[in-house]
Image (cartoon, helix red, strand yellow):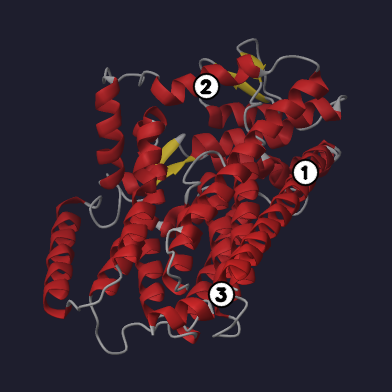
Amino acid sequence: MSMMNEKEEGYSARKTIIKSIIIGLVSFIAAQVLFGFVMYASTLVPQEAIRANMEKSADRICENPPFYVMMRGLMPTMIDGYADAITLNIAWNLDGEDHLRDSLMCEFLTSDSINQTFNFGSAVKGDIDESHYIKQYLRYWHGSSALMRFMHLFMSVKEVYITNGFIIAILTVLNILVFIRNKIYDCAIAFSVGLIASNTLFVPLCLEYTWVYIVMLTVNLLVSLVLTSGGETKNIGKKTSLCIYIIFLGAMTVNFLDFLTAETLTLTVPLLIMSRIVREKKVYILPLAGTVSWGAGYAGTWVSKWIISSIVLKENVLPYITEHISERLGGEVYGDPVSQAGQIFGAIGRNIINLFPIGYGAPGIAGFIVIAIFLSYYVFVYRKKGADPGKIIVYAAIGLIPYIRYIVLHNHSYIHRFFTCRAQMATVMAVLLTVFEVTEIKGAHKNIKIGSQKSRKARK
């Protein structure tokens, strides 16, 4: 009888996997079609309809240098006006006789002698001379540029910043309320501290930083709602499958919108929440499945842009892409003759010191030391027996993902540490969730009764 049950379970598992793959493929194809449609539709917006707001945006962007800090001398408060100028420049130039080509090439006006903020201003105001030329930016989807073209029908970039700020604030509050309502206080604390440590306060002030946070907060909210709905349930398998599917959709969406900033947040943060809430004997299965799903969605969406472009444009677009890939993996740092090993170790170190409070001068470093001493004391005094070693390993593995990313893309992470550092929100959360796992104070956190009946019986 037991062998028959095992065969039935194996058949059911295979059937579920096949069904999930089919749903994933259909969703992937539908998403790529949707992304292509959005890009194409943005090229149909008349340039005159957005001119007035684009001119306001150009004035706003040109008020500041390409890179500037909100708090004097503090790198973690850096705003990337350079990237925002390019995003808006592409949005302005999604207009021409060949709409399909424009939607794929994502061209913008540039110059070798003038910074990108002024190039954007020149593009909008028609102040173009022989030093300017058109440059393609095909390797990304640039969904954010398409959104900017649509949004500029109603507002300038200043109002976009404000709108994005409200969206991020609302999503943040909703996420925390879900944790508090379900008495998952450790998640509420880890999530809040992670947002603070990753300098989220400055995110809405830059288009480049915004999209990852909006996608991450949305994905995490949906995952949390799915897992906490109904409390104890027999449908945990369906719930976790739905959560992995949501992460898959988030991966495709962030690839469409993002500029390669802190994209791993859309994977690591919801994975940590899932690993904390779901109590299964096989604690490694969900994070592994989620990572594979996210990787397939993210990488697949990137590759699909290149394949679609090659087919539609009838040319090999790989030369547009490979030069930049090799640069990000091991290119030189302009003005800084650092070795490859120096870039790798520097990428890790420079990102760590941009976290709050470490990156805020001597007072910040002192504050970090105090926090580290307090947490060490907390663990020593309130440590408990029976901590789940599997969960601790999972938290550690997820918390290390940002550093794997820094090592692989060491050139990019070394140069752009003022925004790639935000991926460490997951590391901060992982540390705090580990602290809560190995300690116990009454009322500090509650285990949701969620998990399969089989696994709960095994624990009893």
**Circle nearer the N terminus (1, 2):** 1
In screen coordinates, is 294 left or right of 357? right
SS class of the residue under badge 2?
Answer: helix
Dot 2 amino acid type: His
What residue would you read off at disc 2?
A: 324
Residue type indicated by callout 3: Leu
Instruction: Please give the name of the residue rendered at 60% of the width and 43% of the height, measured from the top-left corner.
Output: 296
The residues tagged by marks 1 and 2 sit, at their Cα atoms, a distance apart of 26 Å
**Residue 347 placement (x, y as % from top left):** 31, 35
Q: Do the residues labelled 3 and 1 touch (CB within 8 Å)?
A: no
In the displayed structure, would residue 346 be above or below residue 215? above
Helix, strand or loop status at disc 3: helix
- Measuring 19% from the left and 51% from the top, which residue is drawn there? 361
Residue at the location (56% across, 18% down)? Answer: 322
Q: Dots 3 and 2: beta carbons under 8 Å?
A: no
* Horizontal relation, residue 405 to residue 366: left or right: right
Front residue of 168 and 14: 14
Q: Distance between the residues labelled 3 and 1?
A: 27 Å
- Residue most toward the front? 1
- If the image is split into quadrants, where does the N terminus sit? bottom right
Q: How crowded is mark 2: few (under 14 residues within 10 Å), some or many (20 or more)?
A: few
Q: As drawn, is 383 to the left or to the right of 133?
A: left
Mark on residue 227? 3
Q: Position of residue 20 (x, y in %)?
A: 69, 55
Could you tell me which residue is drawn at 72 percent across and 42 percent down?
Answer: 146
Question: In the rendered view of the protein, which quadrant contains the C terminus?
Answer: bottom left
What's the residue type where badge 1 is placed? Ile
Counting from the top left corner in percent of width and height, residue 283 is at 42, 64
Circle on res. 29: 1
Q: Counting residues from the N terminus, which is met first, the one under dot 3 or under dot 1?
A: 1
Residue 186 position, x and y percent, is: 36, 76
